[in-house]
């Protein structure tokens, strides 16, 4: 073989090896990218399933259930009064449950974004696998410099004080856990904040009877959440605008108010400008109904419970054919708001 051919062959071979090396490096890079994507997807999947995720017993036992050392989270059938002497771990359906936690550091050291989060692991007694969920307490209204905290688990509605966060309420979690349980089921609940822990057992009569027992407790917890949402709500800017009147006499202020709940006091009433109605059609152009084209904003107080609301009311008239429309029907979306916000 001539020197020229040898040189060409060696150059071609070098090019091939270089290309193979580049492909190999690219393959490694792609593999790493794929692995990173898989890790991200797995993390997202874990986050999505964290609401009610089954885990292996060894994982939970090392973190929650089998942890040795001092108990920091206590439970009782009556509210705590500066002592853990009445603490117990055994509860039956019908018992109220109160919690007390002793922190080695100020509460603020355990708070993230004004939320105190408990990891709660639970299982039927005798099962191997646990499920894990969360209970979150709104820490904005507690003394975060303190080192002890009383909190509700299944408190009597008249004694309840705990405001939960992000919808992660203790009564709702426990109700969810036992909703498909057999009569006489004994559940184990393990509570943990970082390295602080405690647990209790709950025996139910039946899922149905427990649901009836927990309903007013859940309702009280929900009312706190609604109160907080009302405090955060702001009046829509339409309430600060000039009010107009409908041409249609059936949409007078007096007639509109008749469609609101009974026993209310109207505090503000504003109708926007524009046409009375707009015609609504389906994708084939067939007339379905006509609905109010102006906004109708009403703020009012419920005289029974003292709560205030604002409402964006929309009226419709179904099309009856031959250019005729039927009687008024209303759609509302009443929202709670603190009464002091209505000015």
Image (tube, rainbow, N blue to C red):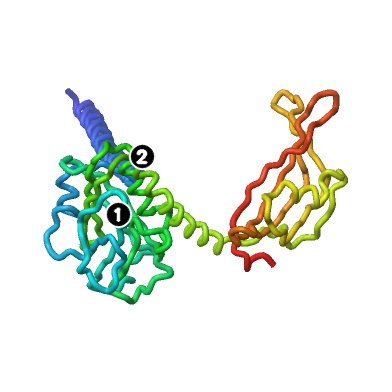
* Disc ID at residue 108: none
Q: x%, y% of residue 6?
A: 19, 28
Q: Name the residue: 29% across, 72% down.
A: 81
Up/down of 281 relative to 296, above or below: above
Q: Estimate how packed mark 2 is, as few (under 14), some (14 to 19) or many (20 or more) residues with alpha carbons within 10 Å.
A: some
Extreme residue toward the bottom, this view: 145
User: Quadrant of residue 322 in the image?
Assistant: top right
Drawn side of residue 326 relative to residue 160, left or right: right
- In this rendered view, identify the residue nearer to me: 228 or 52: 228
Extreme residue toward the left, this view: 68
Quadrant of the drawing holding the N terminus: top left
Drawn side of residue 181 relative to residue 342, left or right: left
Q: x%, y% of residue 215?
A: 42, 48
- In this rendered view, identify the residue nearer to me: 120 or 177: 177
User: Number of numbered discs present?
Assistant: 2
Q: Are marks 1 and 2 in contact (CB under 8 Å)?
A: no
Which residue does the numbered mark 2 point to in the structure image?
208
SS of the residue under disc 1:
loop
Which residue does the numbered mark 1 point to in the structure image?
95
Drawn side of residue 81 relative to residue 316, left or right: left
Quadrant of the drawing holding the C terminus: bottom right
User: Quadrant of residue 270 in the image?
Assistant: bottom right
Q: x%, y% of residue 294?
A: 78, 47
Q: x%, y% of residue 228?
A: 50, 62
Q: Name the residue: 24% across, 58% down.
A: 192
SS of the residue under disc 2:
helix
Drawn side of residue 187 relative to residue 158, left or right: left
Q: CA distance from mark 1 to mark 2?
A: 16 Å
């Amino acid at each position: 073989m001539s020197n020229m051919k040898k040189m060409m062959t060696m150059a071609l071979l070098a090019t091939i090896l270089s290309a193979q090396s580049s492909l190999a490096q690219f393959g490694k890079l792609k593999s790493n990218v794929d692995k990173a994507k898989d890790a991200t997807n797995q993390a997202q999947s874990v986050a999505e399933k964290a609401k009610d995720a089954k885990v292996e017993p060894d994982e939970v036992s090392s973190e929650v259930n089998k942890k040795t050392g001092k108990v920091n989270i206590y439970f009782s059938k009556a509210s705590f009064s500066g002592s853990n002497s009445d603490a117990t771990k055994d509860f039956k359906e019908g018992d109220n449950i109160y919690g007390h936690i002793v922190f080695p550091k100020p509460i603020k050291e355990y708070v993230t974004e004004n939320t105190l989060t408990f990891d709660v692991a639970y299982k039927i007694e005798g099962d191997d696998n646990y499920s894990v969920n969360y209970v979150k307490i709104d820490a904005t209204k507690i003394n975060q410099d303190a080192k002890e905290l009383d909190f509700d688990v299944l408190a009597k509605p008249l004694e309840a004080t705990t405001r939960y966060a992000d919808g992660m309420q203790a009564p709702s979690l426990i109700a969810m856990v036992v909703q498909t349980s057999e009569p006489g089921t004994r559940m184990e609940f393990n509570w943990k904040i970082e390295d602080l822990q405690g647990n209790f057992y709950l025996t139910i009569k039946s899922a149905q009877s427990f649901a009836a027992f927990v309903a007013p407790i859940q309702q009280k917890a929900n009312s706190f959440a609604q109160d907080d949402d009302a405090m955060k709500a702001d009046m829509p800017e339409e309430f600060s605008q000039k009010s107009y009147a409908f041409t249609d006499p059936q949409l007078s202020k007096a007639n509109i108010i008749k469609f609101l709940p009974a026993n209310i006091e109207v505090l503000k009433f504003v109708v926007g400008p524009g046409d009375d109605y707009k015609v609504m059609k389906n994708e084939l152009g067939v007339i379905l109904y006509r609905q109010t084209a102006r906004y109708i904003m009403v703020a009012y107080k419920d005289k029974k419970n003292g709560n205030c609301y604002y409402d964006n009311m929309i009226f419709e008239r179904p099309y009856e054919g031959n250019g005729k429309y039927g009687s008024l029907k209303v759609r509302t979306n009443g929202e709670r708001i603190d009464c002091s916000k209505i000015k």
